[in-house]
Amino acid sequence: MNEKALSEFGDYLLSHRDEITAEWVLAVQRGPGFNLPSYFGDSELIDHLPEVFEGLAAVLKAPQIHDARSEVSRTARRHGKYRWRQGYKLEQVIHEASIIRRILVGTWVNAFARQTPAFVDETRSAAE
């Protein structure tokens, strides 16, 4: 596994964080069957996403450190519990998480892989 390429991917995600977040917000808002509360604006949707990006970048920069992975998991669980208290149904919480994963893997992993030859095979699998 190429740890330098993983670290560069972490930086890449952080540098494109606003674009990824905007793409995610649009996808969530267009999602079928999502009756978001009327007070939900972009900032309410984004709430924990910056923390998740920071955690993902930390994991990519130091994949061998278990504490960073635990922190990302805690942030994700906190987000899910927060959404639950906001009135989301379980499938809505899962759907939001699946959207960010689809965007990250389907768009941004592929874009980074096209420009970074060292980001292949085992390294790419570790990032995904």
Image (spheres, rainbow, N blue to C red):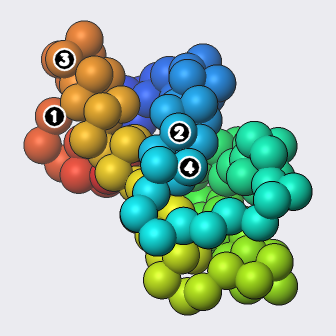
- In the picture of the structure, the residue carrying the numbered disc 4 is 29
- Residue 13 position, x and y percent, is 52, 29
Please say if the residues under marks 1 and 2 sit with CB atoms less than 8 Å apart: no
**Residue picked out by circle 1:** 120
Q: CA distance from mark 1 to mark 2?
A: 30 Å
Label 3 – label 1 distance at C-alpha: 10 Å
Q: Are marks 2 and 4 in contact (CB under 8 Å)?
A: yes
Marks 1/4: CA–CA distance:
33 Å
State the residue position of label 3.
114
Q: Residue at x 41, y 63 (%)?
A: 32
N-term-proximal mark, 3 vs 1: 3
Q: Is residue 63 left or right of residue 106?
A: right
Question: Depth check: 35 or 9 in front?
Answer: 35
User: Going by the image, does 2 lie left or right of 63?
Assistant: left
Image position of 99 with respect to 25: above or below:
below
Distance CA(mark 3)–CA(mark 2): 25 Å
Horizontal and vertical percent position of residue 89: 60, 86
Instruction: State the residue lying farthest toward the top.
Output: 115
Task: Check disc 2 and report the residue beneath it.
Answer: 26
In the image as oriented, which residue stretches furthest toward the right? 39
Q: Name the amino acid type tagged 4.
A: Gln
80 is higher (above) or lower (below) than 47: below
Q: Which mark is residue 33?
A: none
Identity of the residue drawn at 23% across and 30% down: 110
Question: Mark 2 belongs to which amino acid?
Answer: Leu
Picture residue at 59% right of the left edge, 42% below the top: 25
